[in-house]
Image (cartoon, rainbow, N blue to C red):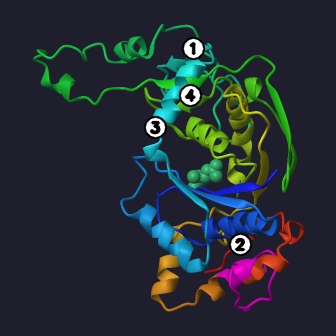
Amino acid sequence: MKYVGRLAPSPTGALHLGNVRTFMIAWLRARSLGGKMVFRMEDLDHPKDKPGAAADAVRDLQWLGFDWDEEYVQSERKDLYRDALSSLVSRGLAYPCVCSRRDVEAAQSAPHEGEQLFYPGTCRGRFASWSEAYSFLNPLSSSTSNSNSKLQLQPPRIPCWRFRVADGSRVAFDDVFAGRFEQDVSATLGDFPLARDEFGAGYTLACAVDDIAMGITEVVRGDDLLAATPAQILVTRALGAERDISYCHVPLVVGPDGKRLAKRHGDTRIAAYRAAGVRHEKVIGRLAASCGWAEEGEEISLAALLPRFDLSTIPHAPFIAVT
Ligand code: GLU
């Protein structure tokens, strides 16, 4: 089976050293195996998406020497996500939920793994449809003659969709980089959110739909998503994937304080390096050195790294970028 990998940036900000290190590993992994690369812009996160960031990411990646064989934009694929959601709903695998984050936090009986909240299934079987859940949250929404302008100015509250996790849903997989990972999704997450709005255009669902539709065989991405993977595997299986996708979670780039690379650590935007006249071989060389494929200070193009690519030399600790 031919390897199909993906680069899936979210246009929530400028591309920086952190994203690019992961993309570099993903690209080299696919190309070194003679595989295909899919580019997917994950632009469904409207409140966080920045105008122009999608086009900038493409330009930055091309400047660095990345290429791909197919290109997709998630905001143009919402019909597919809606169809997938309808299929889950019709099989009793998804239901609308009106609980706020605060409600879910209040229902926690014990601390659960990581940052993810455990959801005890409060809205399971509670509403016959999404519109019923919507009316529950917005009892005045259909009343156009309402004289209370204060109430009319409130933005509507939107139910989310949750995935119905069967009891004892334990998922185990052998991550290509991170090793064996196991999670009892029913005990750790409970019925996790699938989509944030009526039409199912949310990250967890969109990602599963697209990975299947695009024939992705392996996902290489940052290990901040490792704990979210068992839930994604359940959705992918529920959507009828013929086989599990392989996963390869690699360590993130952090600042000297050990926190995920961010603006406060200095300007590591690719666009800033380019504007300052830094050569792309220098940016790639620095990241390659952090993976054990180049000497410190060596300048090398992405394509020239192909014969040196080796997953086993990448340190398992996060890469500390000193800017
Ligand atoms: N779009 C996500 C991000 O930029 C990546 C999701 C994924 O690779 O599955 O964080």
Labels 4 and 3 touching (C-beta < 8 A): no
Looking at the image, tell me whether mark 4 or mark 2 is earlier in sequence order.
4
Disc 2 residue crowd, few under 14, some 14–19, many 20+, Cα 10 Å: some
Q: Does the beta carbon at disc 3 come under 8 Å from ligand 1?
A: no
Q: CA distance from mark 4 to mark 3?
A: 10 Å
Which labelled disc corresponds to residue 320?
Answer: 2
Judging by the rendered image, the residue that carries numbered circle 4 is 84
Q: CA distance from mark 4 to mark 2?
A: 40 Å
Judging by the rendered image, the residue that carries numbered circle 3 is 78
Looking at the image, tell me whether mark 2 or mark 1 is earlier in sequence order.
1
Residues rendered magenta in the picture: 284-303
**Horizontal arrangement in the rendering, residue 27 relative to residue 180 (left or right):** left
- How far across and how far down the image is residue 42, in percent? 52, 51
- Which of pointers 2 and 1 indicates the residue nearer the eye? 1
- Which of pointers 4 and 2 indicates the residue nearer the eye? 4
Type of residue at label 3? Lys
What secondary structure is marked by label 2? strand
Q: Is residue 49 above or below residue 192?
A: below
Q: Is residue 56 above or below residue 196?
A: below
Looking at the image, tell me whether mark 4 or mark 3 is earlier in sequence order.
3
Q: CA distance from mark 1 to mark 4?
A: 10 Å
What secondary structure is marked by label 1? helix
- How far across and how far down the image is residue 64, in percent? 59, 78
Looking at the image, tell me whether mark 1 or mark 3 is earlier in sequence order.
3
